[in-house]
Amino acid sequence: MEAPPMFEEQGQILEKAVTSLILHMPKCFGAWNRVKTHKSSSWFIGGMLCVLFSLAYSAQTSAEQRVIDPESSTITVHVYKTGLFSVFAHDHLIRATGLRGVADIGESPTVSFEFGAGQLKVIDPGVSAGDRAEVQHTMEGGKVLDINQYPEISFKSSSVTKQAADRWLIKGSLAFHGTTREISFDVQENAGRYHGKTVLRLKDFQIEPIRLAGGAVGVKNEVGIEFDVRLASKPWSSLFPGYSAARATR
């Protein structure tokens, strides 16, 4: 099974640490040689210092990485009505929290994230709980998301182009409903939050827009997607909190 994008990023960090450890082995052995006439505890201390030195060195190279805060980040989907009798229907508002991922905001920025398709929840305001539950059931079923067959949605950037001090154009691959497509979207930073939007076509991901009453009412092929993301404040926390957040949802 292919590793999720965020674990690939963390694997690269670990690889840097191991590489750094190998490169600094001569210094470590030099330190060990100076203490080899002492007790075995000195050997242990020397070894620990060597490992800590290598990890600290590699941490500097990853200082710009941030974990996406899963509790404060959301993806919102706008599904629009269509058809002759669309006046009697309503648009749908769907939202997901619990995003898992990593962003590198250094000189070569990247971003990758994933979330469970089952985390998308219908929040249509102004309709009954029963109607929301019915829409939720239809959305999760085989005619739309088919969350049992396609449980994960993920994105991995291929390029991040800075357009202004607080604005970027992001391009990358979106894996959704068993299909991977290239998408792009603008992102704006404001008070530590990153907001972006794009438009997806359901048919591009092998989803046929729902039609009722012979097509007299249904949903459009185009859906609006909004991202509102907050990044964690501590760079090195990208190793452990991100991992535990991902494992907690599996």
Image: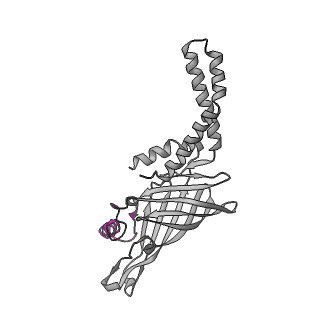
Q: In this view, does 113 lie above or below 144?
A: above
Q: Which residue is drawn at 67% across and 60% down?
A: 166
Residue toward you, 247 or 181: 181
Q: Residue shown at 38%/88% (left/top)?
A: 84
Among the 4 quarters of the image, the one containing residue 132: bottom left
39 up-or-down from 135: above or below: above
Q: Give the colour scheme shown.
A: one colour
Residue located at (57% from left, 64% from top): 196
Which percent across, then down, holds residue 213? Answer: 30, 84
- x and y percentages locating residue 48 in the rendered image: 57, 25
Is any part of residue 71 visible from this angle?
no
Residue segment shown in magenta? 121-147
Residue furthest to the right in view is: 165
Considering only vertical position in the picture, is 34 above or below 56?
Answer: above
* Total tally of numbered discs in the picture: 0
Side of 238 where 91 appears, left or right: left
Q: In this view, does 40 lie to the left or right of 212?
A: right
Q: Where 89 falls versus 187 (above or below)? A: below
The reply to whether the magenta stretch includes residue 126 is yes
Q: Which of 16 and 245 is in front in this view?
A: 16
Magenta includes 101? no
Q: Is residue 116 visible from the viewing direction of this image?
A: yes
At a point 64% along the width and 34% down the height, the residue shown is 23
- Residue 198, horizontal then vertical, whole percent: 54, 69
Q: Position of residue 209 (x, y in %)?
A: 39, 76
Judging depth in this view, the residue of 180 and 188 nearest the camera is: 180
Front-most of residues 189 and 115: 115
